[in-house]
Amino acid sequence: MKKFFSKLTAALSAAVMIFTAVPIDTSAEQPYDSYNYDRWGDAIPSQAGYTTERTVSGYDLDIGAFSSPSDIFISADRTFYIADKDNDRIVAVNEGLTEVSAVYDSFTMPDGSETHLSKPTGVCVSAENGNMYIADTENSRILIADTDGNVIREITKPDSEIYDSKKTFQPQKVTVDKAGNVYTVLGNITTGAAMFSPNGEFMGFYGANRVEATAERVRNYFRNIFMSDEKRSRRTRTVPTGITNFDMDGDFIFTCTSSSSQTTDTVKKLNAAGKNIFANMELTFGDFTPMYDTSQNKVLAPAIVDIDIAADGNINCLDYTTGRVFQYDEDCNLLFITGALARQSGGFVQVAALESLDEKLYVLDNVKNTITVFSETSFGKAVHKAAALYNEGRYEESLEPWYEVLRRDGNYHRAHVGIASALLRKGDYKGAMKYAKLADAGKIYDKAFEGWRSEFLKANFGYILAGIAVLIGIVMSAVRLIRRRRKEADGK
C-alpha cells in the first residue's frame, strides 16, 4: 500500500510539472515519447536529454548514397571517418558534416602497388600518430595508412600456436591504444579481441567474456563430471559470446556484446591487465524490461552493438534491439534514453554505430544509410552540468544544479541519487537519508544513517549516560524493594 501511494504521488507530481511554468523540451519531430526509469525500475515519462537536429546522407555530401555503412569515428582533429562498407571506401567528413575532405577507395602499398578495400567494417584514427586503422574485412587484414592513403603496415592472419590455424581472419572493428597496440574484434572468435604490437606482432587475446552461469549450463557441468571421456568429447562445448565493439578511454578499454541472450559482461570496463572493473557490480544496460516482439512472438533482450565514451566520461550504449541510445554517467547511473525503431527522423531501422562530440550524439543506420545528429536539450545540459560537477568531486557545487533538475522533473531518479550523495559528502545526514529513501539507494541511506547515528550519540552522550545511570538506579531500587518485601513476607 505504501508503494502504491508513493507511485501515485510520483504520477501526480509529473502531471503538475506538465502544467507548470517550468520549460519543457519538446520536439514535434520525435517519433517516440521520452522516458526514464524510477526507483522501482518502472518506465515513466521524462524530459528528453537530446532532440533530433538533422539526418545526413551521402547525397547531402555529394558523394552518392552510403551503402550499408558500418562504423563511424571522430578523430582528435574532429574529422568524421565513415566505413562505407558496400561502397568499399572510407569517407572523411568535416566537423559540421557538410563537406567531404577525402574519399579513400584505394591505397598505395609500400612497394608502390595499388590496393583496394573490400567490405571495410571498422575504422579508427590514432590520436598519437594520426594514422588510420581499417578493418578490411573481406581482404582479411587490418590496414594501417596515413591520411594521404599510403599504407604503413598490413596486419594479416597470425602465424601463432595461440591462434587456431583453422580459423579465418575476419576483422570487424579495430582500435588502437596510446602505446600503438592494435585491438581487433574478429567475426569468428569468442576468446576476446586479438591484440597486436605496434609493429604488427600477434600478442594474444584480450578481454574475453565470461560464460554465463545459467541453470542449464550448471546442470551440464555436473553431468560432465560423471560422463566417460568418449561421451564428453561428443558434447557441444559451452563458449562465451564474442565482443562486438569497443572504445578507448585513457588506460581503459570498454567493450560490449550484441548477444541478446547474454546478461553477464554486456558492457565491460577493462584495465591494462584485462580485469573487468564492472564484474562485481549489479548493472543493467538497456531497457529494464525486455521488448516483446509480436511478429516473432518472443522477448528481445538488449543487444549492445556499439559503445562510446564521451569526453565528460558518460557512457553511451547503442541497443540494436530497440534502436535506442542509453546514456549512463561514470558510475553507470542511467541519464537518458534517446531514439527508437521508426522510419521517421530521429528513429532507426537498423543501428550500426555511434559517436559523441561535445554536446551531440551521432548515430549510424546501415539500412537507412544515414547519420542522425542529436543535440543536447536545455534539460540535458542541466543534468550533464550537475553530473559533471559531482564527478569532479565538487559535491556542494552540484547541489543547486541537481535541485534545478528536480524542479524541472520531480521524478528524475538520478537527481535524487546525486543530491543524496552530495548531502552525505557535505555531512547533512538527515537530508541525505531523505533523498536516499526517495531514490531507494540503500547503500547511501545506510552510510547516512551511520553518520546521523554517530552525530546523535556524540551530541547526546551525556544525556544518554545520565539516562542509563537513572535507569540503573531505578532497576536497583526496584530489586531492593522486591527483596525487602519478600523478607517481610517470609517473616510473617
Image: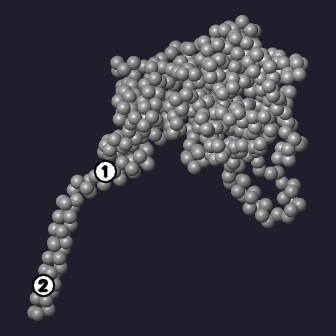
Q: Position of residue 197 (x, y in %)?
A: 75, 37
Marker count (numbered) = 2
In this rendering, which labeled residue sits more in front, label 2 or label 1? 1
Q: Position of residue 23 (x, y in %)?
A: 39, 18
Find numbered disc 2 in the image and state the secondary structure of the residue it sits on.
helix
Image-based side of 174 in relation to 354, left or right: right
* Residue 365 appearing in the image: no
| Sequence-wise first label, 2 or 1 | 1
Q: Which residue is mark 2?
A: 485
Image-based side of 5 in relation to 128, left or right: left
Q: Which residue corresponds to the image point at 45% horizontal and 20% vertical from the top-left?
A: 378
Q: Position of residue 475 (x, y in %)?
A: 18, 74
Q: Nearer the viewer, residue 414 or 94?
A: 94
Q: Which residue corresponds to the image point at 52% horizontal and 36% vertical from the top-left?
A: 330
- Find residue 452 and name its label: 1
Q: Which residue corresponds to the image point at 72% horizontal and 53% vertical from the top-left?
A: 217
- Crowding at dot 1, Cα within 10 Å, few <14 / some 14-19 / many 20+, comes out as many
Quarter of the image where one finds residue 30: top right
Instruction: Determine the CA span between mark 2 and mark 1.
Output: 45 Å
Colour setup of the view: one colour
Q: Position of residue 162 (x, y in %)?
A: 82, 47
Residue pushed farthest top? 62
Q: Amino acid at mark 1?
A: Trp
Quarter of the image where one finds residue 404: top left
* Residue 174 appearing in the image: yes
Image-based side of 306 in relation to 47, left or right: right
Q: Nearer the viewer, residue 322 or 473?
A: 473
In the displayed structure, 430 sits above or below 313; it is below
In the displayed structure, 443 sits above or below 120; it is below
Question: Looking at the image, do the residues carrying marks 2 and 1 touch, with CB atoms under 8 Å apart?
Answer: no
